[in-house]
Each structure stands twice: as C-alpha cells, then as structure tokens.
Image (cartoon, rainbow, N blue to C red):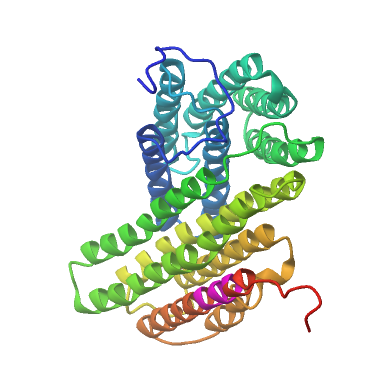
Amino acid sequence: MGDGNGWLRPPRLATGEKRSATRLELFYDLAYVLVVAELASALLKDMSWTGVGIFAGLFTVMWFSWVSTTLYANRFDTDDVLFRIAILTDTAAVAGCAAAATGGLSGFDIPFAVCFLIGRLILVGLYVRAWWHVRDSRATVVVYLTGTSISATLWAVSLLVPAPARYILWGVSVLVEAASPFIATWRGNTAPLHMEHLPERFGLFVILVLGEVVAGIVTGVHDAVWASPSVTVAAVAFVVGAGLWWNYFDAASVSGEDELQDGAEEDGEEKEVDERHDLYIYGHLPLSLGIAATGVGLEDLVLHPDAGLPSPAMWIAVCGVALAMLGAGIVLGGVHQRISAMWPWPVAALVPLGALTFLDVPVLALVAMLAAVVVLFAIAGARQRRNRSSRTSDPAPAAGTD
C-alpha cells in the first residue's frame, strides 16, 4: 500500500510533492454523481419555486461536504489503511444521502441527516488525527477541526427538532464550514493547499456534473421514444453542454491553474495565494450548480419540444447557464484578484442570456440561440486567456529603454 512504509502512516502535509488524483478520490466522487443525479430527478418532477429551492439547497449542502473532504485530502492524504477506511465509509454515507435525496425532503430528511452526520464525524476524526501528528500546521487544522465539529453538532441536533427548524440548522452548519477557509486565511495559513492538485480535483468534479447534462439529454431522447423533434432539440442541446465544457476547461480552469501555481511559486505571496484559492474554490459552487440545473432544463425541453414558452424548463436552462458563467467569472476574479478579470468574459454573457428569457420562440430556436451564446463566449474566453498569456509572457523592457 502506498510507498511501502506500512499499513499505518501518520498524516503529514503533502503539498510539496508531485500528485495527481488517486483511484480512491475517483471512487469517492462517484457517490456524488449519484447525489447530483437524484437531485436532478427530483427537480425534473417538481420545477416549482419550492422544487428549485430544495434542489439548490441540497446541492449546496452536498457540494460543501465534497469540498471539505477534498481540502483535507489535498493537504493530508496519507493513503494508509485508516485514511482509506475513512474515505470508503464516507463514500457509503454519501451514497446514503443520494438515496435519501430521491424524494427531495419528502419523508427522507432524517435518513439524509443521519448519513450526512456520519460523513461529518469521519472528517472530525481525520482532523483530530492531523492535529495530533502535524504540529506545524495546528493553527490551521484547529480552525477546520472546530468548524467541522460545530457542523457535526448542528446536524446531530437537527435530528431532534422538527422542520423547518431542522433545515435552518443545516443551513447554519454549511455557513460555519464555509467560513473556515476564510478564518484560516485571516489567521495565517500554516497548511497551504497543493495548488497543482487543487484545480485537477475541481476539474474532475465539473466533468462529473457535465456528465449529468449529457445524461439528461439522453434520458429526454429515450423517454420521448426517439421522436424526431426531440432528437433535433437534443442534438442542439448537446452543443450547449459541449460549450459549457469548452468555457470551463479552455478558459476558466486553465487560466486559474496557471495563475494559482505561478502565485504559489512566488516568495512572500502566501496571503495573496490563500485569498486566491478561497474565491477559486467558492466560484465552483454557482458554476457546478448552474451546470446541473442546465441539464435538468435541457432534459425537459428535449422531452417537450413543442411546449409553449416561457416555461419553467426554459427558465431553469437559461438561468443555469447564466449561473455557470457567473461562477466562472468568480473563479477568474479570485485568481487574478481583480473584478475586471470577469469582463468581458464571462460576465458579458449575462446580457444575451437575459434577453433570451423575453423571447416567445419555439423550443428548438431557444435552445439553438442558447447554444450560440455559449459557444461564442467559449471562443471569446479562450481568446481572452491566450491574450493574457501572451502579455504576461512578454519580456519586460530593459532598464533605460523607451
């Protein structure tokens, strides 16, 4: 197992070595594929404001659970037997959350909370282990340990109170864990993240969510029994999914990876890099949520190609794309540490996307225009990234020259 040093190895800060995603991390991510799929299925059945709220709320809860465990593994992955058992047990707990998410919150909120609590307790145990063994990083570890412990306590208490107070406690627990990275940065981070490994992990999660877009389109075609209008809409809808992939991986993700690693290599820039990774991380929440919502909206549009617009599916699809583009902008704004990095790509896309919501056109025309906006801005984003790269790679003029 691992490097051959035995079954048990104490945690250590592993941010200075060459790393890539492990098979265990990929297996862990599969449980979240189930979560996203079940949440999407619930939203497809109830596209009311209540359905959208439950979808967004539970997606946010589960996204933070993935992020919190991923940040621990990014720093302290020992790949020993205890770490493997912990992550595999957490994977089973996440799968339980997926099973409970099938009906939204209709009768499954207690099983959902129990499974989620198991994951929090596992992470508490991992941070206790890191606190004990990685003494130089205790100032940062204690922040995450405290935040995760408070979160676990709130989830445990939520089992004893009725709704809606139960859901309020869930929201507070998410806010507590969301604040931990900012508090760690403010106090002075003694456990820096692995900046090369971080974008890879987030990129893999985005791939999984994009897979749900494709799955929704395929399911729409299947459920429509391969009717010609649905197949045509599906073909164009696939371009929307491909364009979202293009926007992220050829503009936002690549730019973010380069800037994060360049900043991490500079001496005396620790605080700036910490601030960068905070927004880089949190920008992925609206981005991933938007992509998942887009898949639901497109699936319904494929299934009902003759539906009258505007419709809930249209709003979910268009607003999902807008949310994904806004998330990509937050990623870039955090990486470059300036709001101007979001303009013109990708925030300018919100203007034509907003205009689409006022159009009274057939479903095929709407999806075609949505695809055109996404593809055009993918091209614009790629060009903007190349222009920035060329400017930063130009040698500085020699001293004394005009």
- Relative depth, front residue between 130 and 103: 130
Query: For the point 74% across and 50% down, which residue is it?
Result: 272
Q: Is residue 385 left or right of residue 275?
A: left
Query: For the point 65% across and 37% down, which residue is it?
Result: 192
- Relative depth, front residue between 73 and 239: 73
Q: Is residue 388 magenta?
A: yes
Q: Is residue 370 above or below residue 192?
A: below
Stretch in magenta: 382-389
- Rendered image quadrant of residue 179: top right
**Residue 70, image x, y percentages:** 52, 37
Q: Is residue 194 left or right of residue 96?
A: right
Q: Is residue 200 above or below residue 333?
A: above
**Residue 17, image x, y percentages:** 51, 35
Query: For the point 39% across and 37% down, which residue is it?
Result: 31
Q: Is residue 28 above or below residue 131?
A: below
Instruction: Indicate the quadrant containing the C terminus: top left, top right, bottom left or bottom right.
Output: bottom right
Query: For the point 61% across and 72% down, which residue is it?
Result: 388
- Relative depth, front residue between 170 and 62: 62
Instruction: Indicate the quadrant containing the N terminus: top left, top right, bottom left or bottom right.
Output: top left
